[in-house]
Amino acid sequence: MMGIGLGLGIPPSLTGGAIVSGAFFGDKMSPLSDTTNLTPAAAGVDLWEHIRGMLPTTVPAMVTALIIYAWIGMGYGAENVDLTSIKEIQTSLAANYNLSIITLLPAVVVVIAAVMKMPAIPTVLSGVVVAGLVAFFMQGVGVHDIFTVLQNGFVSETGFAVVDQLLSKGGIMSMTWVVTLTIFALAFVGSIEHYGTLKAIMAKINKMVKSRFGLVMTTYASTLGVGTLIGDVYTTLVLPGRLLKDKYQEMGYKRTTLTRSIEDTGTLLSPLIPWNMGGSFVAATLGIATLTYAPFAFACWLSPLFGLLWVFLDKFIPREEPIVNNDTSTLSTIDNV
């Protein structure tokens, strides 16, 4: 997409902002996303309830962003665009792979399983199995090679650099750093919870937070603060969830507002912070500085603004019977991770 944007004469900052908006919208709303699964697990919220709770902020933000991108895009024409590179990509793919509607089956299976609200692991596994069958019967890949790709990833050798970079991806081993960071994040938050640190912080918060607006703003501030200071997405999502989940119950608000607020400021703002995992990854991938594309990642920073709007208007803030919870159990109670 960056290459196509350059070909259309669109500034890289605009293209990068649009890519980030779409990518992190998908990351936030997908039932297969690590952040989307981790956040409700830390706060004790059902996955699909969490996703429904994010709709009032995420959907208006994305729709608004699409309208802005469409308006900006009308200022760029395709009359003098050089489509040579795009045609070369198509030719290279057709020369090295058997492409047809059947090759879309793995994606279709994953989407159908997600719509049917199947758990994340069976959903991903079903996509992997179907993709393995497609590779075996359509691409002529041996069974041994399929399992090697699953473990160590795939290295494309078409001879065309753009295609090789696009298709060369890691397998299970490349995801070990994500799993390790998640374990470290859970262990860190679990330790400070077990030794009473969160309880001490919560005592201070109880004295200050007296209103709906104060509660949500505390969630925003704690999530953004951890994301800015630590730069680790997983700790950013887990720590505020464990810290504030009981406070929402005590004040009679469903914890879906908590998990939504955490994702609005944790997941969506992470690519806008240069030293955060999200910002550093996007900058390295797109080849442009974080602060260059950040102003144009409209969906990312509009979502928390919509969250504040609903707080002011007292809309989409579901309530429940207040529950005083004195449970001091550790993160071992999280059985969804």
Image: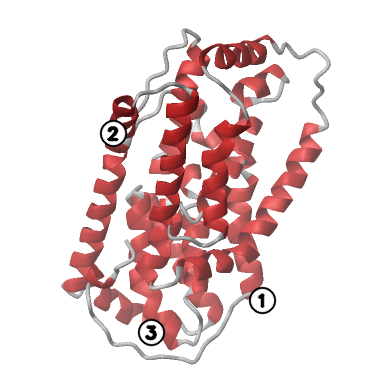
| Element class at badge 3 | helix
Identified at 31% across, 81% down, the residue is 203
Q: Quadrant of the N terminus?
A: top right
First in residue order: circle 3 vs circle 1: 3
Q: Which residue is mark 1?
A: 315
Gap in angstroms between the C-alphas marked 1 and 2 = 47 Å
Q: Are marks 1 and 2 in contact (CB under 8 Å)?
A: no
Q: Is residue 154 above or below residue 294?
A: above
Place of residue 99 in the rendered image (x, y in percent of width and height, measured from the top left): 58, 23
Q: Is residue 20 above or below residue 157?
A: below
Front residue of 104/140: it is 140
Between marks 1 and 2 in the image, the one whose residue lies nearer the viewer: 2
Gap in angstroms between the C-alphas marked 3 and 2 = 51 Å
Say whether residue 101 is left or right of residue 253. Answer: right
Place of residue 82 in the rendered image (x, y in percent of width and height, measured from the top left): 72, 11
First in residue order: circle 3 vs circle 2: 2
Residue 328 appears anywhere in the view: yes
- Kindly identify the amino acid type of the residue bearing the numbered disc 1: Lys
- How would you rate the neighbour count of disc 1 (Cα within 10 Å): few for under 14, some for 14-19, many for 20 or more? few
Gap in angstroms between the C-alphas marked 3 and 1 = 25 Å
Place of residue 84 in the rendered image (x, y in percent of width and height, measured from the top left): 68, 9
- Kindly identify the amino acid type of the residue bearing the numbered disc 3: Lys
Q: Which residue is mark 3?
A: 207
Place of residue 175 in the rendered image (x, y in percent of width and height, measured from the top left): 31, 40
Q: Which residue is mark 2?
A: 151
Front residue of 317/333: it is 333
Identified at 53% across, 47% down, the residue is 109
